[in-house]
Amino acid sequence: MTGKNARHNAFLRLVSGNGATLRSELRYSLLPGKDVVIGRDPSCQVVLDAMLYRMVSRRHAVVRYLSSSPDNKLSWVICDLNSANGTYLNGKPLQGCQELHPGDRISLGADGPQFLFENEFVSSATVMSRPVSALPSALHTQGQSKPDSVSFTQLFPIISTGKDLTRKAYLIPGILTVVFVVLMFATVGQPQANQVIVASYIAFAAYFFVYQLCGKQKPWWVLMAVALTTILILKSPLLSLFIFVFRDGGILPGNIPSSKDSITLTELLIRMFFGAGLMEELLKALPVLGAMAIASGLPSPWRERVGVREPLDGILLGTASAVGFTLLETLGQYVPVITQNVAQQAGVGTGQLVGLQLLIPRILGSVAGHMAYSGYLGYFIGLAVLKPRLSWQILPIGYVSAAALHALWNATGSINALLLVVVGVLSYAFLMAAILKARALSPTRSQNFATRFLGPK
């Protein structure tokens, strides 16, 4: 029948899995307004056996109702839920959410179970409206446990987690924590080596916090290369050139005053703006700009992995550069100086203790310090890439803003501790605001986060 006496019903049919063709009766109804989540978690509407389908994530993909046309034709979309092995539509990796058409084949992982999307045209008199949850036989066939039974994977959960363990359970940070703890024990009695281990771990933890907030994956070796490049720049003759131009050469009013100099707060802010803010933020931005230049000559997808294509990339590379800067500045300058000064007055042991007391807040506070300034500038670098016609306006604003925050911190450091807290919170807020805006602007936000874009707003 047609017209008012007919309608379209949508189904998912499990047609193959684990190398075997399955019975056509394994069919799951799709109803308007009802999300159908596919995965190994018992709370999913389509539950797959964890032992048979280890490549399937606990919540792998979702089929959602999109719209209905005047002729009652239903429209549906398939979205990946940040699964470990990805979702494929007709053999191609799913990017964001895509509309389904009759005959489309959905694969959970490259070699995982496959579903066929069907849209049947049936008489309304024969339509039985029943929710997806009313298909117990199909669900239990796929391995949903009975209430009074326990499965092998429930007794030994590590067997069925697969790649989810490394990607969703923070296994890598856990492993690194254990490694650093062992190294800390191994370097007890060796103050300098122990300080390096402690500083490296705190820096890793602070950066991981920012990395998780950004929500975008960037190869670890790219981030480490940026941090190491910053360290190499600071150890190279280039640093002397920067100091001459911004501080000591008389070219710019950035000469850093000594503790004996008596100057006004305004003069101190100006000197810190040029001698610390502009100079150090440009130094930290050089590896980010270098990664952009290198990536421009690479083919896709290496261009996207290495370079800066959006604000999130700029934030990730900028904060990585700040980690390298903070580590070298703290371990190579501040800690040795205060350790030596205190050791001459109160003994070597006291000097080492004070050095460690200085090290921890300097590295941990980099989230509201060097990482905040450089990450904020990185946001503007990425924004300039995203909007190249306005880059001449975007980059100066970002550079001056980051340098001003940096100068404000340095200038207030010797005035009042409460004021220093206010400046630190302000810098942290600027970085967090940049991350939130970068997430909203990200062209790849549907792949970065679990929430997917389901159509025009």
Image (spheres, rainbow, N blue to C red):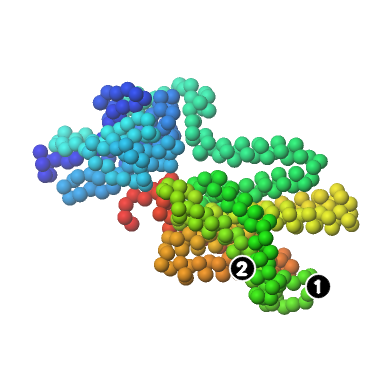
Lateral position of residue 192 relative to residue 397, left or right? right
| Amino acid type assigned to the residue bearing label 2 in the image | Leu
Q: For residue 33, which numbered disc appears in the image?
A: none
Q: Is residue 154 visible?
A: no
Q: Is residue 168 visible?
A: yes
| Amino acid type assigned to the residue bearing label 1 in the image | Lys
Badge 2: residue crowd in 10 Å (few <14, some 14–19, many ≥20): many
Foreground residue, 376 or 153?
A: 376
Res 105 quadrant in image = top left
Q: For residue 278, which numbered disc appears in the image?
A: 2
**Residue drawn at (28%, 31%), measured in percent from left and top?**
13
Query: Is 211 located above or below residue 280 in the figure?
Result: above
Res 420 quadrant in image = bottom right
Q: Viewer-nearest of labels 1 and 2? A: 2
Q: CA distance from mark 1 to mark 2?
A: 24 Å
Q: Which residue is mark 1?
A: 260
Q: Count every numbered label the image shows and give the total.
A: 2
Foreground residue, 114 or 93?
A: 93
Lateral position of residue 211 relative to residue 43, left or right? right
Image location (x, y in percent) of residue 61: 38, 39
Foreground residue, 140 or 403?
A: 403
Image location (x, y in percent) of residue 30: 28, 38
Image location (x, y in percent) of residue 121: 16, 38
Foreground residue, 53 or 328?
A: 328
Q: Locate the N terminus by quadrant.
A: top left
**Residue drawn at (54%, 57%), measured in percent from left and top?**
290
Q: Secondary structure at mark 1?
A: loop
Lateral position of residue 122 relative to residue 313, left or right? left
Going from N to C along the chain, the mark reached first, 1 or 2, is: 1
**Residue drawn at (10%, 41%), measured in percent from left and top?**
2
